[in-house]
Image (tube, rainbow, N blue to C red):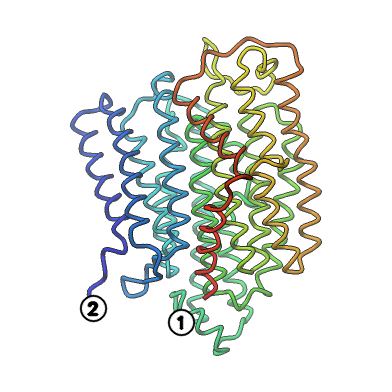
Amino acid sequence: MVLPDFSIALPEIFLACVAMALLMVGAFRGNKATSLISWLAVLSFIIAGLLVQFDGYSSVTTFDGLYRDDAYAVFMKTLCLGASAFAIIMSIDFNKREKLVRFEFPILIVIATLGMMVMISANDLMTMYMGIELMSLSLYVTAAFKRDSVRSTEAGLKYFVLGALSSGMLLYGVSLIYGFTGTTNFDVLAGLFTSGEEDAGIGLLIGMIFMIAGLAFKVSAVPFHMWAPDVYEGVPTPVTAFFAAAPKVAAIALFLRVFVTPFGELVEQWQQIIVFISIASMILGAFAAINQKNIKRLMAYSSIGHIGYALVGIAAGTEEGVRGVLIYMAIYVVMNIGTFACILSMRHRDGMVEDISELAGLSKTQPWMAFFFLIFMFSLAGIPPLAGFFGKFYIFIAAVNAGLIPLAVIGLVTSVVGAYYYLRIVKIMYFDDPAEGFEPTSRTQSIIMAAAGLFISFFVIFPGPLLDGAQAAAAVLFP
């Protein structure tokens, strides 16, 4: 019997121990320890990030081939840990003001992040499902965290019911794949299709379709997007910021790992499905957000559109396409964190506001906040020379080189349409008569805005580290 190498999963083991320890601290000290627990959770993410970097650049497996660590896992785990850390930091002041101080909140995010890391390193369909459920169960509770709010409770219930449905579809797809191949291991599956021992029969294709449906729910891709607008609007804003970043990265990472590694030889079979949901997501994201008045609902449709762009790179099925997706998701996370830092600063004396019209004249009342908001809106719209433009550039170039020129053209057209509602926000901030001014922006939100804004603005000058990291990560999936 070969003992597993536990050092490969050291970051995950560390986070699991941290979650249990923080739960004990909360149980004994109550909600008064929430701030301490929150900062300890952030510290744990930093330590886990260092552990991830420590020994993740050689491709190794453990637990009898169930778990893999490589440069790809390092890249995506680092993104998830960073996004989760910022989500907790942004929540601290908000939860105090809104009287939502409960020690369970940061612990749930730690557990959800642990699930994301398991998803990213999954090398077997069973490991994949364990990671998805660990993440999802934590997210269901987090979505309904504001128990006294009807909107939040409704959002949590919708997310739970639809999430359970998607998990069932995913499991059905996994069972079909196992039934027709006799294995759930990614490496064994890849070997079967590479050697030609296994043909892509109709049963296997149906299993792949059900798997795509289950994963499409996790990234809110059309037609499995119906939960996103209501959940984004209903849950507390820091939770929305978390949902918009870290879980999307983990789900896209799993999408790539599953369909490039074990099913890479079957790209012609699954490519047309990905192309369809990519086009549908880009079109819905571009047009459905035009008439939105709530900033969080607008960001929900925006995220649907951006996932459509990421799926363009997956549809390419090439190393260049994977590299483009990784670059895009890194930039997407930073843009979303910065945008939600601005949204969290939309507060009057009476409480938080979410109506876009409340941003009227912001350039006159809070010029710095308006300036950073402008940077994030321009970047989300893909206007050069900001980082968002380069994210789309690498995606579309990969699609063109893979022969998916119509898909790239549709992406460009929907980008132009989608730019309307981003520019409308800029117009409201800079050219409309001032509305009631917001309360002063907290120091935490100001620092996050500034850091994200600087990254977005100066990416064009220093793109090397991100491009090199994405290239090394993408190469792992194409040995």
Label 2: element kind? loop
Q: Are marks 1 and 2 in contact (CB under 8 Å)?
A: no
| Mark 1 vs mark 2, CA separation in Å | 23 Å
Q: Residue at x 61, y 44 (%)?
A: 461
Task: Please tell me the numbered disc located at residue 2.
Answer: 2
Q: 341 or 265: which is nearer to us?
A: 341
Residue type pointed to by label 1: Gly
Question: For residue 415, what is the image quadrant?
Answer: top right
Q: In the image, is 338 to the left or to the right of 130?
A: right
Q: Residue at x 71, y 40 (%)?
A: 381
Q: Position of residue 273 (x, y in %)?
A: 68, 65
Q: In the image, is 59 to the left or to the right of 157?
A: left
Q: Quadrant of the N terminus?
A: bottom left
* Depicted 104 relative to depicted 265: above or below: above
Q: Position of residue 97 (x, y in %)?
A: 42, 18
Question: For residue 252, what is the image quadrant?
Answer: bottom right
Q: Residue at x 41, y 67 (%)?
A: 126
Q: 406 or 440: which is nearer to us?
A: 440
Task: Please tell me the numbered disc located at residue 182.
Answer: 1
Residue type pointed to by label 2: Val
